[in-house]
Amino acid sequence: MLTPSQKEQLLIRMLYKNLNPDGTLIIESYMYSPSLGRDFLPLYFNFRNGVISKLLGLRNDKSTQSDAQFLNVIRFLDSYLSLMSSRNFLNKVLDGDSPYLERIFDDSINPSTLREKDKTLTESPDLVSTEDLICNLIYLKTNHVKNDREYFTDLLIQKFEASKKLSGHYCITNNQSNITISKGSNNSASLRTYWMFSLLLLTSSIGVEGIRILSTLLKVNDLLCTIPLRQITEAIDPQKLAFTLAVETLIVGDIQKKILAKYETN
Amino acid sequence: MKLINIGMVATETSRSLIYLQSLLVSDLIPSHVLLLLDDKDELRPGQLPNSKLVRKFLISNGLNHDVLKTGSINHQSVINYLRTPGLPEVFIYSGYGGEILGKEILSLEKKFLHVHGGYLPQFKGSTTFYYSILQENFIGYSAIFLNERIDSGQILFRKKFPVPASSVDFDHTEDPKMRAKILIELLHEYNKNMLWNETEIENTKTPYYYIIHPVLKNLAILYCSDTRVEN
């Protein structure tokens, strides 16, 4: 019988090559990853839940700070999460016994903060900060604003999938209605930007139709989970990162149930 | 029967080996095979651990072939080679995964016939085999002539299949076998009137799928297994 720690190590070896000297992981190609049958999914859930527990042990003062894009994503996902009867679980992730989600819905949303970042692309279409671009895309998506920018999410996914990295800035070129983005700076995106990217992908990862995006979300979150906790919690509120990971596990669990149900009815 | 004016670009991969075995069994012999041998230490995507099987197969079956020591279809030696007069106009393409054909090779007067592991245009990109199991409860394959964009060439033939059993090795066995089936069916059709049936299906403007995350891949395999048990 494997201990939880041995199971976590097994999962890490399956997904990644080995550890860097600083304790972070070197991600191996996802190509031809092994099939490990029924043992694999419980290992995944164990691994993510282990990270969530550690993050919740590191709550800090930032947890109470308002974060417009985060709140937008929670609001956007609420009907889906309620359907899965998961609000109690998420309340626990976010604030122990206190109904954090209810507080968000009742008091915390300031409409002016939710509208911020809507200017990013129109004001400076050539060179954009990746974080601003992602904030803008989250705003548009979660507020159901009709726009022609959904394509940008795919362009960011393309960039991330090619190198497993995001640049701090991107140049946007609109050439004969063919929009492309290219690296706008040599600086890597901040850890917070990766987390924002994870939030953006969460909004499109729901259900069987979101599986394409979910695959990239899992990779982004793999990256976030491989960074030493002290380092990552300096950049991202641990509670909010824990929430993002918890919703990811709920989405995977939901797909697992839906696929099973589909096959049972066939 | 020798395939007239159809050659094959092969590599030391399970896909190339299964293509060649299937072509031979179906009496469809490529008029010429170009084998690309990668001399790097690390295994390339799809490369067989014991990677001399394709060459042995070519020799033992007396197939007309040449060998180039590069793993890249875009290498100058390949481009120079394909300029040789008298080579076929169409090559069945079975190169290493993860490489797209560059401008120079596409500018040659050759066509590269590829069987993609997804039902086009919906499932474009990598490991679409697993995505379509999860999303649609089927697997699909499409034969195309390669162009400068990934999986966006003219569709020649496409077909859906029920999900296979998970007990088999999808990547190295089941997937290449299904691709070979499509290839053989297409070539038999071509042989009837020596024409490629280029469909009118629009094959652009659909999003790409990237290599599936192992969590989702295992979900797909798991539920194939459940289906097979229930059936």
Image (cartoon, rainbow, N blue to C red):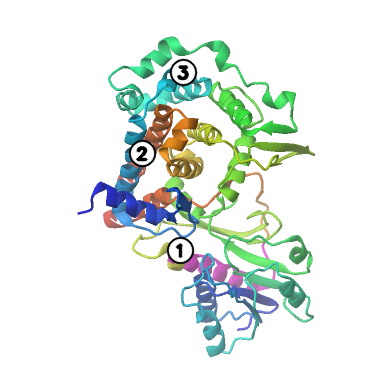
Q: Of residues B140 and B213, which is closer to you in this image? A: B213
Q: Does B181 appear in magenta?
A: yes
Tag shown at residue A65: 3
Can I make out residue B226 in this image? no
Q: Chain of mark 3?
A: A
| Residue type highlighted by circle 2 | Val
Do tag 2 and tag 1 residues touch (Cβ < 8 Å)? no
Subunit of label 2 = A
- The residue identified by callout 1 is B171
Of residues A166 and B75, the one drawn nearer to the viewer in this rendering = A166
Q: Which kind of residue does numbered mark 1 sit on?
A: Asp
Neighbours of disc 3 within 10 Å: few (<14), some (14-19), many (20+): few
Q: Quadrant of residue B61?
A: bottom right
Q: Which residues are magenta?
A: B174-197
Residue A78: quarter of image: top left
Q: Which mark is residue A51?
A: 2
Give the spatial CA distance, label 2 vs label 1. Answer: 31 Å
Above or below, comparing residue B77 to residue A264 in the picture = below
Residue at 70% x, 27% y: name it. Answer: A121
Which residue does the image show at 50% across and 81% down from the upper left?
A: B53
State the SS at label 3. loop
Rounded to the nearest whole Å, what is the CA distance between mark 2 and mark 3? 22 Å
Q: At label 3, which amino acid type do we have?
A: Gln
Residue at far left of view? A1
Say which element carries label 1.
helix
Q: Are marks 2 and 3 in contact (CB under 8 Å)?
A: no
Q: Is residue A34 above or below residue A236?
A: below
Would you identify the image quadrant in which residue A141 lies?
Answer: top right
Q: Position of residue A250 (x, y in %)?
A: 36, 35
Mark 2 crowdedness (10 Å alpha carbons): few <14, some 14-19, many ≥20: some
